[in-house]
Amino acid sequence: MPQVGDRVEAGTYSGPTGARIANWVVANPLVSMGTITNISGNAVTIAPMSSLRGPARTFLVEGYSRTYLADGTVQQGTTRGLRVGAYAHATGTADTPGPRAPQGYALVIHQLQK
């Protein structure tokens, strides 16, 4: 449950009266883009590209998490098909409000190469 002081991001669109309407909200968002360096059970670790700053992040894949594999397959709640060494982009949420949190919960992982 989000708390006062948490970072929040939202996606919005213009409603019929022109007012902005949120269609998604994420508290304490995390993003990582780089190489998958480890897969252990439901945990996927991604080391950032050399041009990006930040720590390697471990994303826990839960029942609501989606993975999009490079072959076009879409999965939910599993790390099956992800590969160490593949380039990937992940978005998720963390328990803590700091943008440099080393671990979070995967919302979406895109494996961009086989």
Image: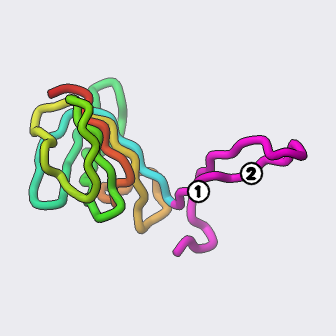
Point 30% across, 58% down: residue: 103
Point 63% across, 52% down: residue: 23
Residue 43: assigned label: none
Vertical position of residue 42 compared to residue 82: above or below: below
- Type of amino acid at the residue the image marks with label 1: Val
Q: CA distance from mark 2 to mark 1?
A: 11 Å
Q: Magenta stretch containing residue 70, yes or no?
A: no
Point 26% across, 49% down: residue: 75
> Residue 65 at x, y = what percent?
33, 56
Q: Residues within 10 Å of mark 1 (few under 14, many from 20)?
A: few
Residue most extreme to the right: 17
In the picture, measured across the screen, residue 13 lies left or right of residue 16, that is left
Residue 25: assigned label: 1
- Type of amino acid at the residue the image marks with label 2: Ile
Instruction: Pick the residue in front: 23 or 47.
Output: 23
Point 42% across, 50% down: residue: 30
Local SS, label 1: strand
Instruction: Pick the residue in front: 26 or 24.
Output: 24
Total numbered circles: 2
> Residue 54 at x, y = what percent?
34, 41
Vertical position of residue 54 compared to residue 29: above or below: above
> Residue 81 appears in which quarter of the rendering?
top left
Q: Between tags 2 and 1, which lies in front? A: 2
> Residue 112 appears in which quarter of the rendering?
top left
Instruction: Pick the residue in front: 102 or 107.
Output: 107
Local SS, label 2: strand
Decide: marks 2, 1 in contact (CB < 8 A)? Answer: no
Q: Which residues are magenta?
A: 1-27
Q: Magenta stretch containing residue 4, yes or no?
A: yes
- Residue with the mark numbered 2: 21
